[in-house]
Image: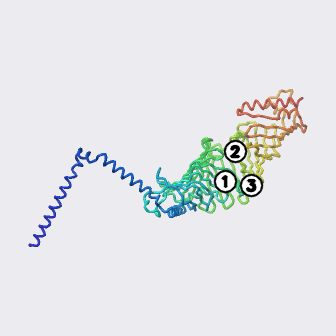
Amino acid sequence: MNRHNYFVRILKRLNFFINSHLKKNLNKLNFLFEKDKLLTFLSFKRIFVFISVLFVSCFLYLSIPHLFNSKKLVSNIKNQLLKNLNLDFNLSNNYSYNLLPKPNLKFENSSFLNQVESSGEIRIYISPKHFLFPNKIKIEDVIFDKMNFNLNKENYNFFIKLLNNDFSNFSLKVENSNIFYKNIENDVLFINKINELKYFYDSKTSENILFADNEIFNLPYKIEVKDDISKNKIFSKINLNFIDLQIENIFNYKNFEKDGLIVITNNHKKSGGTYNLKKDFFDLNFFDKSLDQNFEYNGFINLKPFFSELSGNLNKINLDTLLNPNSILIQFLKTGLLNNKNLNISSNIIAKQASSLRDFINLALNVKISEGLVDINETKFSLKNYADIKITDSLIYTNNNNLILDALISINVKDFNEVYKIFQTPRNNRKEIKKIEFRLSYNFDQMTADLSSFKVDEIINQKINKTLNQIIFKDNKLQNKIYLKKLVNQAMNDYAG
C-alpha cells in the first residue's frame, strides 16, 4: 500500500511538471495569434534572411554536379542512354552544366555510331532528386540539337525503330537538324530538314508517339506515328497542309507477311487501298473510295532486284498536276532520285478523259525508268476522235535545274476537217493533212515548248518550223487556248501557202 501511494505521488509530480512547462511555452506562442506581435516577429530582416538562405541552399544543391567526377557522371549518362534508346553515344568528358530553364548537361560534337552516323549537340535534362549521388542521377529529357543524321538503305528505318524504346520516364526531342539520305555510292540523294521532332509516351492509350514538323524539297509537312505494341500495329499520319492533303496508314507487323491499309484525303475527297509485304515483295491495290469512283491502281514492287510494275484506270486525269512546275511530282523528278541504274520501274495508266483539256481522250500514259533513264515512250492519246497522237524517242532529264522533256511527236489525222473546226481555222487554209511529225522540247519550269523538224505528210516545212519554233505558255488557261489557236492557224496559213 505504501509503495502504491509513493508511485501515485511520483505520477502527480510528473504531470504537474509537464503541464506547467506546456502552459509556459504555449504562452510564448500566443503572439502568433496577435496581429501586432506577429508583424513584429515577421520583420523585413528575418524574411530577407530566410529567403536568402533558402535561395543559396537551393543554388548550392543544384550546383552539386559541378563537383562530380566527370568520368563517373558521363559513364552513368551513357549507360542510361544505351539502356533507354539502344544507342551507343560518344560523349566527351568536357561538358557544360546549366541551371536554366532546368538542370541540364550540354555535350557538343557528340555522336552515336552503332546504328546511324551523326554529329551535333546533345542536351540532357536530369532529375534533381538524386543530385548528391552521381551514380543515381536519372535522365528526364533528351534533346538533339543541330544534328546531322546520315541514313542509307541499311538504316533507313532508324526513326521508326526508336519507337520500340520506353519513353514512359522521359521524352526525346530533335531540333534544328537534318536527315541526309544517301545511295550505295554514299552520294546524298535528298535532305530532310527537321524543325522539331519529338518522341513521348501517351499514358492514356499506352502508346509511344512520334511527332515531327519537317521540310523536304522546301515543302513543309507534318507526320505523326503511333506504335501500338499490344496490337502489333503502327499508325501514321502525314499532313501536307499547303495542298490540303492528308495520308493515314495502318501497318500490321504481327505476322510474317506484313499488311496495311492506307487512306488519302485531298480536298475532302477520300481514296484508299491495301498492301501486302512479304520478304522482298510488295503488292498493292489502291482505289477511289467515293461513290462515283474515278480510279483504281494495282501493282507490285520487287525489292531484290528492284523492279516495279504499276497499272491504273481512271475516268479523268488532272494534267495540271503533271504539268504544274510547282507540283510535288515535278520537284521530285528534279531531284534525280530516279536516275539510278539499279532502279527499274514500269507504269501504265489509262484515262478516259483529261479534266482540264476536254478535247483529249483515251490517254494511255506509259512511264518507264530503266538504267537511270526516264522516258514516256509509247504514250498515246486522241484529240477527240479526229486525230491520234503518239510519243516516242523520249527522255526526261534536268538541265540547269530545269526539268526537260525531249520527245518525238507523231499525229495521225483521221478527220482533218473536224480538227480544223476545233482550232477555228479559216476555210481557205483547210488543206488536207494525214500525218504531222515534229520534235518537242518542253521545259516544265519555264513552261516553254520548242518545236523543230516539223514534217507534214513526210515533207519538212521551214515556214511552220519558224512559226512554231517556241511556244510560251501562261498561267491563264483561256489565254493559252487563244494563244495556241492563233499559232496553229498561223502555221496552217504557212502550210497552205
Cα separation, mark 2 vs mark 1, equals 17 Å
* Label 1 packing within 10 angstroms: few (<14), some (14-19), many (20+): some
Assign a secondary structure to mark 3.
loop
Q: Amino acid at mark 3?
A: Leu
Disc 3, disc 1: CB below 8 Å? no
Q: Amino acid at mark 2?
A: Gln
Residue at the image point whose x is 46% and y is 60% from the top: 67
Residue 331: which numbered mark, if any? 2
Disc with the residue nearer the chain's start (3 vs 2):
2
Q: Which residue is mark 3?
A: 343
Q: Amino acid at mark 1?
A: Tyr
Quadrant including the C terminus: top right
* Label 2 packing within 10 angstroms: few (<14), some (14-19), many (20+): some
Where 241 sits versus 346, above or below?
Answer: above
Cα separation, mark 3 vs mark 2, equals 19 Å
Where residue 62 sits, quadrant-wise, is bottom left
The colour style of the image is rainbow
Where 409 sits versus 252, above or below?
Answer: above
Assign a secondary structure to mark 2.
helix
Q: Is residue 175 left or right of residue 357?
A: left
Q: Work out whether residue 184 or residue 276 is closer to the camera in this orientation and state it.
A: 184
Disc 2, disc 1: CB below 8 Å? no
Where residue 371 sits, quadrant-wise, is bottom right
Give the label, 3 or 2, closer to the camera.
2
Cα separation, mark 3 vs mark 1, equals 16 Å
Return the x and y of residue 459 as percentages of the image width and height: 91, 37
Disc with the residue nearer the chain's start (2 vs 1):
1
Give the label, 2 or 1, closer to the camera.
1
Return the x and y of residue 113 as percentages of the image width and height: 61, 61
Q: Which residue is mark 1?
A: 181
Return the x and y of residue 327 as percentages of the image width and height: 68, 42
Figure disc tally: 3
